[in-house]
Amino acid sequence: MAKSFDRRSFLGATAGLAGLSLATPAAFPLVAGHARPRTQPSPRTVPPNSRIGVALIGCGKRMFEMLGPLADHPDLQIRGVCDVDATRRGEAARRVVERMRRRAIEAGGALGDAGIAEFVDHRELIAMPGVDAVVICTPDHWHANQVLDAAAAGKDIYCEKPLTQCLHECRAMIEAVRKHGVVFQTGSQQRTEYDHKFVRACELVRAGKIGKVLSVHVGVADPPVACDLPGEAPEPGLEWDRWLGPAPWRGYNAELSPRGVHNHYPTWRNYKEYCGGYLADMGAHHFDIAQWGLGLDASGPARVEPPEMGDRAGIGGQVPMRGATLVTPDGVRIIHGGPSGTTFVGTEGIIAVDRGRIASVPGNILDTELGEEERLPRKASHIQDWVDCMRSRERCICDVEIGARSAALCHLMNLAYEHRRTLHWDAAAWRFRGDDAANAWLERDRREGYALPAW
């Protein structure tokens, strides 16, 4: 008889897993992937021996991490960079030219004095001749406008996660990418990288090796708070009004857009005007793995429930937000809270995965041999998968709908925390069932000039 795992068994088992802690830290790691259909997103073709012209939008820490692999890739040619901060924009251009010059010398040639075009407005960059694709690494509140502009211009897109800041943007992105037939990759690298730990976890779950899945526990931090940062003297060379873009006006603060070139992730991620909090920032990765493992890449939950909130005092008077739950159509509970990463609990076992570990109860689950039909794809890297798909015109391993539906889980959780009531979600229609009040929360307030298409 299959052994069932109740809550007490789960807590006892996970406490013993190597490297796991049931404490929930303040920030967490990433995830993503799926067997892509052999479909043609677009009639556009890329000649097999040509290099793909790429433009970079948003030159912060994440873009500087990606800049080397992009600039060094033999199939890519960076044509221009865009940022609202002159210092970061100029530094990105300098680094691209440096790497291009080094590559030219290694190939026995010389780059000469060629430079890289620099832009403040992403629309001008997109319109630049020779640009076939864009990489978007701006704060989340800018993603939707930039994705829609790039898609309308027929540019293939790599956009960092979380893809969106609200549910309306999820559907708008999917429709724009499908309408214009562009190749799209969401920056959720856990489906392709990290020694394929997440691939292994998901294929074992999907193959039924832990029995029927009862729950999935996602260990990420809290929902966002309203921004209350004081105004400061503006940073020279920063177009602050354009940094805000669709977001409400407020005075400059270095926590939102750090001064100069920096090597940290800014805390705009904590504020709901710019992001869905650290729940969405890391949740876009780990909820993505929950979706993948459950086979819900093209759908989503049927219900979201708020936690039971008792009298719980947190550090500095803040109450930690954990316990909101998504319920799938077949009753699997996806719970916000638990060890960092994604933990699948089934009737016959547990699989827990994070960037630095994968573990199971019983331990021999990880040794299970799978048939070829049960295996999920293993890609060399996220960027390489994007490049391959730009040539083949297939969908990427983390296509726009996959990224949008993973972001949607985070938005649904945040709405449950904010409004403290159960919500019934129609994943096919991208609306709440019979709930006009909740449907008013699909979109966020936007400044004039930044409206998205309605439906």
Image (cartoon, grey):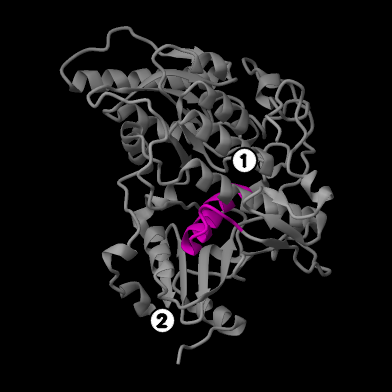
Give the overall secondary structure of the magenta segment. helix
Q: Tell me if I can see residue 431 in this picture.
A: yes
Q: Secondary structure at mark 1?
A: helix
Residue at the (38%, 36%) spot, across then down: 40
Q: Quadrant of the N terminus?
A: bottom left
Which amino acid lies under the numbered mark 1 shown in the image of this protein?
A: Arg
Side of 347 where 199 appears, left or right: left
Residue at the (57%, 79%) spot, across then down: 11
Residue at the (43%, 67%) spot, across then down: 206
- Comparing 411 with 240, the one in front is 411
Which amino acid lies under the numbered mark 2 shown in the image of this protein?
A: Pro
Q: Tell me if I can see residue 258 in this picture.
A: no
Q: Position of residue 214 (x, y in %)?
A: 56, 75
Residue at the (38%, 48%) spot, across then down: 36
Measured Cα–Cα span from mark 1 to mark 2: 40 Å
Between tags 1 and 2, which lies in front? 1
In the displayed structure, would residue 335 be above or below residue 163?
below
Q: Secondary structure at mark 2?
A: loop
Side of 207 where 48 appears, left or right: left
- Residue 298 is a magenta residue: yes
Query: Where on the picture, by quarter, is residue 50?
Result: top left
Q: Residues within 10 Å of mark 1 (few under 14, many from 20)?
A: some
Residue at which label 2 appears: 362
In the displayed structure, would residue 153 be above or below residue 429?
above
In the displayed structure, would residue 40 be above or below residue 450?
below
Q: Position of residue 145 (x, y in %)?
A: 62, 28
**Total marks in image:** 2
Q: Residues within 10 Å of mark 2 (few under 14, many from 20)?
A: few
Q: Position of residue 384 (x, y in %)?
A: 33, 39
Residue at which label 1 appears: 171
- Residue 225 is a magenta residue: no
